[in-house]
Image (tube, rainbow, N blue to C red):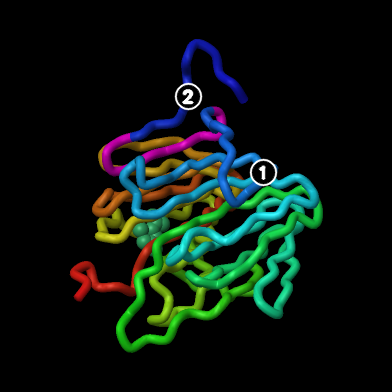
Amino acid sequence: MRRQFGETRSVIERRHALISPDSHEVTPMPGWPGARIVVVISPQMGAQFSQFFAGMPEGAIARAPAQGVERFVFVLEGAVSLQTDGRTERLEAEAYALVPAGMAHEIKAETAARLVVLEKRFVPLAGAAHPELVVGQVNAQPKRAMSEDGLLGVRKLIPVDERFDCEVNVMEFQPGGSLPYVETHFVEHGLLMLGGGGVYRLDDAWYPVAEGDVIWMGPYCPQWFGALGATPSRYLIYKNWNRDPLPG
Ligand code: UGY
Ligand code: MN
């Protein structure tokens, strides 16, 4: 929805950002011919990763990212096929893939499709093997309780394994559920509200958030979420982790 008189809910601060759909800017992107790309989080903002939406018309094909960059793809609408050396996977809504750095691949829109994509420079760990391709479906992952009141659960989309330098989770809040405490941590987040809504605390500001909103939380941004409304709230959340803050 386009607002009048120069209003938007988007806010860009030094250590956090909220990007609401009303301020999306469509850009072309090399490697994504024909797609409508909206970059919502990027290093230009202060993040160490990028997060973008890709609206692909049927038949469009995306190529692999730059050398050393890993890619997480989550299907919001439609269907794509992910082709890697010797393997083709069909991904429909709520399916996802983590394509390790250096893996040749193509993403083809089997129907018109909308994706959210996260990319980061992979941080290898001495002694650990290179990660493998991960493909999955949100609901196939077990929901683990994350609060004593039973109102918050998390589904981990990537194996908990030192080979991986990031995690992507879906957090599910029943109405009235919240993060148990205000978190402060050295890792950063890219978040997409998948449904429902509530209030997100970022630094010393409290923002109403709803489906389609994107949040960047930089290192040490104090953060808390409380779900409001009659239906559950869900968000997709990335974080860099599993690596020492002082790399050798
Ligand atoms: O995993 C996390 O750090 C997560 N609980 N943070 C968040 O939801 N803002
Ligand atoms: Mn956190």
Q: Which residues are magenta?
A: 13-22
Q: Residue at x 66, y 77 (%)?
A: 85
From the top left corner, tell me how far across and down residue 133 is, in percent: 57, 76
21 inside magenta stretch: yes
Circle on res. 8: 2
* Front in this rendered view, residue 26 or 10: 26
* Front in this rendered view, residue 221 or 116: 116
Circle on res. 46: none
Above or below, 168 against 1 in this view is below
Category of crowding for the residue at label 2, using alpha-carbon neighbours closer than 10 angstroms: few (below 14), some (14–19), many (at least 20): some
Above or below, 221 against 93 in this view is above
Residue 204: tell me if it is visible. yes
* Front in this rendered view, residue 73 or 7: 73
Ligand 1 within 8 Å of disc 1? The answer is: no
From the top left corner, tell me how far across and down residue 68 is, in percent: 43, 66
Three-letter amino acid code at the position of disc 1: Ala
Q: Residue at x 27, y 38 (%)?
A: 14
- Horizontally, residue 203 falls left or right of residue 178, namely left
Three-letter amino acid code at the position of disc 2: Thr
From the top left corner, tell me how far across and down residue 48 is, in percent: 34, 54
- Image quarter of the C terminus: bottom left
Q: Residue furthest top?
A: 5
Q: Residue furthest bottom?
A: 127
Q: CA distance from mark 1 to mark 2?
A: 25 Å
Look at mark 1 in the image and give the residue it sits on.
35
Above or below, 210 against 75 in this view is above
Q: Residue at x 24, y 73 (%)?
A: 244
